[in-house]
Amino acid sequence: MTPQRVPLLAGLVVLLAAACTTTDHDGAAPTTAPAPVTAPATAAATTPAGTPAVPTSGTPVEGAWRVTYDWAVPGTPARVAHQVRVPVTPAPGEPLPVLVEVRVGDHPTEGFSRITFAFRGPTPSYQVGYVPQVSTEGRGAPVELPGTAYLSVRFDPAQAHDTRGAGTAVLPPARIGYPTLRGWAAAGDFEGHLSFGLGLQPPAGGTLPVRLGEATRPDGTHVVAVDVRRG
């Protein structure tokens, strides 16, 4: 009896260890906090004039993923445009793509950390770029973020609230704590503009290359990923 129990126990240990480190197919860990959180409502975002569009075709990566902006430093905001017909669904349905979840995941072997934004409805356009400081849309109030470098992440048209004004997204803790991706924060949700800030800690100051990508999950939600080099 004893020689048969040892392999069985060893197998259970391996399975439990694998379950603890699993990430989903889009490379971000499932969010553990189930309570929706509402992003602050502020004035509408303004897209900088002359922002270059980034092609939305790219090389497939990690299965269903496709790269929309490959590893580079977006000093000028990188914008990926999508045509979204509004309203997305007739009343009383949702007029815009709705944020339903934010996830984070670390990938030491591949050398990057990831934050993903999942939307119900079509993929909105999005824009990512370095800024001296992330500010709330319209009011311009500073958004507190950890680190020494800051990325602005903006979606349009999109929202993170329902018809009653309640938050629709399940969100991870604001403090991420990965080697270079240190934290995130909401920066605006108003009139079809949805904004976030990412706090980064480059190893020697300066800026880090980022990568953008998209995918569709098996449940039909559309995901936009922001990848940041770990060093």
Image (cartoon, rainbow, N blue to C red):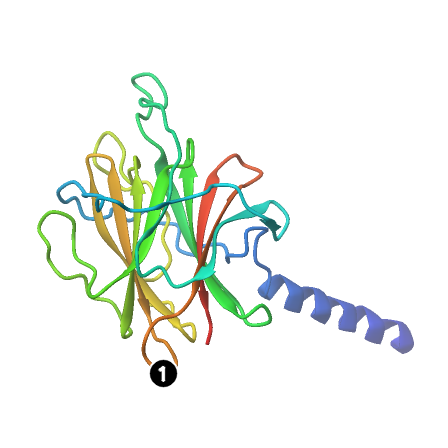
| Rendering quarter of residue 142 | bottom left
Quadrant into which the N terminus falls:
bottom right
Q: Residue at x 42, y 36 (%)?
A: 123
Q: Work out which residue is located at the far bottom of the displayed protein and give it.
A: 204
Q: Residue at x 50, y 67 (%)?
A: 112
Q: Work out which residue is located at the far left of the displayed protein and give it.
A: 139
In the image, is residue 137 above or below residue 96? below
Assess disc 1: are there few (<14), some (14-19) or many (≥20) residues with their C-alpha within 10 Å of its C-alpha. Answer: few
Say which element carries label 1: loop
Relative image position of residue 19 (x, y in whole percent): 63, 62
| Rendering quarter of residue 88 | top left
Left or right: residue 80 versus residue 108 is left
In the image, is residue 43 above or below residue 181? above
- Check disc 1 and give the amino acid type: Ala
Relative image position of residue 206 (x, y in whole percent): 32, 75
Task: Determine which residue is flagged by label 1.
Answer: 204
